[in-house]
């Protein structure tokens, strides 16, 4: 479906979807923990905006509730919880650059192309105007996965996980006009519970290995190395 | 097509090229003035760059003993190549014969030619600063050029033409379409323009600080009319990027014919747009600090990423399957 044939509101939805993809890249590349949390909050806000606009443009009133839920949960509550956690762990100034930024970014671009290629046969069936967004949301999921794979830091991995959830939500909105409300509420609650559990895990990991670098969890020694 | 071959159209094209050269110092003066006001200084008058050029054109030329003829020729090559590149950009009207003989890729090529001679001239005398500046300029341009070309291809894919006039025409005559790819291409082009014209996060145009300068380091050995031509070429380049951004992304107001009334409106519109862009640039230069040279590749990688996302966004979101 060519963008020229769409009304202005639906074009705005596509622009916002493109910005969601950009925010995925920003999140992936972010060196500072606090800025990564902010980038995640922006992504949540953008996903909420897309959902709200799809609800208006596609006359799907139940999506308003999803949009509100996403805004409160993904753009406000979870970033706030993460922020508090980071402050409690005294990691506000923590910054670690990507190991090989150019390579990771290229991989992410390749993932976008891959998801486009993957989605072509799906979107050939007639869908609403949102069908062009399916590839974007799949790319957001894959970039979240890439972020979990390329970052050893636990908080950043959780951000990658949450970004994946954002992508899945966007996929649901763009492909089928949102999930049933029960499922959506369930997922939202799950994410919230996961966030609380992650918080507990952070504190536990921090206590046992004195760092949030999960690569160090691979060592199976009971005693610190200098004792041996 | 036949009206494009008429002498009046060519006269107008020549007039527009002259206008480019005449407006360029004014834009630089306006940016300096706006920046000075933002920093609570009174600043030099807007017309100061004209006076500087006039003064430099009247001064004697001193050339180093080690300089080869290339050093003397370079200012003319740089100026003419930049000016020729500027002549292909629609400034007040789209409908010009120059638009039919040169597209955006030629424009990028002409700018590359100017940059090549600038770098050669910087290295020619054999001073440390000249070579350093030339190597830095090449670093920046090698990274900026792919981003610029990708941004240009994004525009070209939308308009199905690499011709600037057709791109602007397609944008002007179609309905208002919010294109994600244009948003990304605009971002990429702005970053490239900042890097290529040596504005603040990349290079500081107003200092001669050894460790950080790029453009100034290359023209350090020039004096008199040679220096005037080099500075004038840099000002034309700034105006070129400014009018490229203003007219491609915000084409409203530009004349589509050769009627005097439309041309006057086009001139007023482009002056207004450039004044707004200049004020924006001055604000950005006031709030931003210059970054280290080794951060510049990351800055230009961002431009490349934006351009790439624009291209992908065009394919994925706009064309559909």
Image (cartoon, helix red, strand yellow):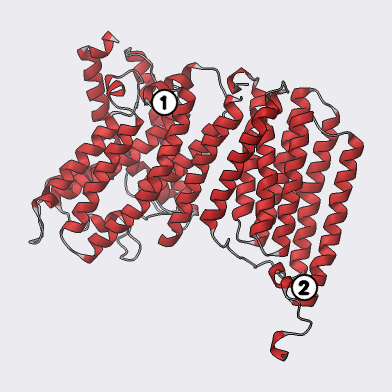
- Count up the numbered dots: 2
The circle on residue B269 is 1
Residue B72 makes an appearance in the image = yes
Q: Tell me where residue B268 sits by quadrant.
A: top left
Characterize the local packing of mark 1: few (<14), some (14-19) or many (20 or more) Cα atoms within 10 angstroms: many
Residue occupying the point 79% across, 29% down: A177
Q: Position of residue B209 (x, y in %)?
A: 32, 64
**B140 is higher (above) or lower (below) than B178:** below
Give the quadrant of the C terminus of chain B.
top right
* Residue B292 visible in the displayed image: no
Q: Does B213 sit left or right of A122 as displayed?
A: left
Residue A45 coordinates in the image, percent (x, y): 72, 43
Asked whether A102 or A196 is in front, the reply is A102
**Residue drawn at x 65%, y 52% as measured from the top left:** A146
Task: Describe residue B10's horizontal placement relative to residue A79 as left or right.
Answer: left
The residue identified by callout 2 is A206
């Amino acid at each position: 479906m060519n963008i020229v044939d769409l009304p202005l509101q639906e074009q705005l939805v596509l622009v916002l979807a493109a910005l969601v993809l950009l925010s995925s890249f920003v999140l992936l590349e972010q060196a500072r923990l606090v800025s990564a949390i902010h980038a995640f909050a922006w992504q949540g806000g953008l996903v909420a905006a897309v959902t709200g606009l799809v609800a208006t443009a596609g006359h799907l009133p139940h999506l308003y509730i999803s949009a509100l839920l996403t805004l409160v949960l993904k753009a406000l509550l979870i970033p706030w919880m993460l922020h508090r956690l980071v402050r409690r762990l005294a990691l506000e100034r923590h910054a670690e650059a990507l190991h090989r930024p150019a390579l990771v970014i290229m991989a992410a671009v390749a993932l976008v192309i891959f998801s486009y290629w993957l989605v072509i046969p799906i979107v050939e069936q007639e869908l609403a105007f949102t069908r062009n967004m399916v590839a974007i949301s799949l790319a957001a999921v894959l970039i979240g996965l890439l972020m979990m794979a390329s970052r050893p830091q636990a908080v950043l991995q959780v951000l990658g996980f949450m970004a994946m959830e954002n992508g899945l939500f966007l996929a649901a909105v763009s492909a089928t006009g949102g999930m049933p409300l029960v499922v959506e509420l369930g997922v939202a609650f799950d994410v919230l519970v996961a966030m609380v559990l992650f918080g507990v895990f952070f504190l536990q990991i921090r206590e046992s290995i004195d760092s949030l670098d999960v690569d160090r969890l691979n060592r199976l020694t009971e005693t610190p190395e200098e004792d041996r | 097509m036949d009206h494009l071959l008429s002498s009046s159209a060519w006269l107008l094209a020549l007039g527009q090229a002259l206008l480019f050269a005449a407006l360029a110092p004014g834009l630089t003066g306006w940016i300096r003035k706006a920046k000075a006001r933002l920093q609570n200084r009174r600043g030099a008058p807007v017309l100061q760059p004209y006076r500087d050029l006039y003064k430099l054109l009247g001064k004697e030329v001193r050339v180093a003993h080690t300089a080869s003829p290339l050093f003397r020729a370079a200012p003319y090559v740089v100026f003419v190549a930049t000016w020729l590149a500027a002549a292909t950009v629609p400034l007040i009207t789209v409908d010009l014969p120059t638009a039919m003989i040169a597209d955006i890729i030629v424009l990028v090529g002409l700018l590359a030619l100017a940059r090549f001679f600038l770098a050669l001239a910087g290295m020619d005398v054999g001073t440390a600063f000249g070579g350093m500046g030339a190597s830095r300029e090449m670093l920046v341009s090698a990274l900026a050029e792919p981003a610029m070309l990708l941004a240009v291809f994004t525009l070209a894919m939308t308009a199905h033409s690499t011709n600037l006039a057709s791109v602007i025409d397609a944008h002007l005559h179609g309905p208002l379409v919010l294109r994600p790819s244009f948003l990304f291409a605009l971002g990429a082009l702005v970053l490239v323009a900042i890097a290529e014209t040596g504005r603040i996060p990349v290079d500081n145009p107003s200092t001669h600080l050894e460790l950080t300068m790029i453009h100034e380091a290359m023209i350090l050995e020039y004096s008199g009319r040679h220096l005037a031509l080099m500075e004038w070429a840099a000002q034309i380049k700034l105006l070129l990027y400014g009018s490229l951004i203003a007219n491609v992304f915000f084409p409203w107001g530009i004349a589509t014919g050769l009627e005097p009334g439309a041309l006057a409106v086009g001139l007023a519109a482009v002056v207004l747009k450039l004044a707004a862009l200049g004020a924006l640039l001055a604000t950005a230069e006031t709030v931003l600090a210059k970054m280290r040279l080794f951060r510049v590749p990351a800055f230009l990688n961002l431009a490349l990423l934006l351009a790439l996302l624009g291209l992908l966004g065009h394919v994925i979101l706009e064309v559909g399957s």
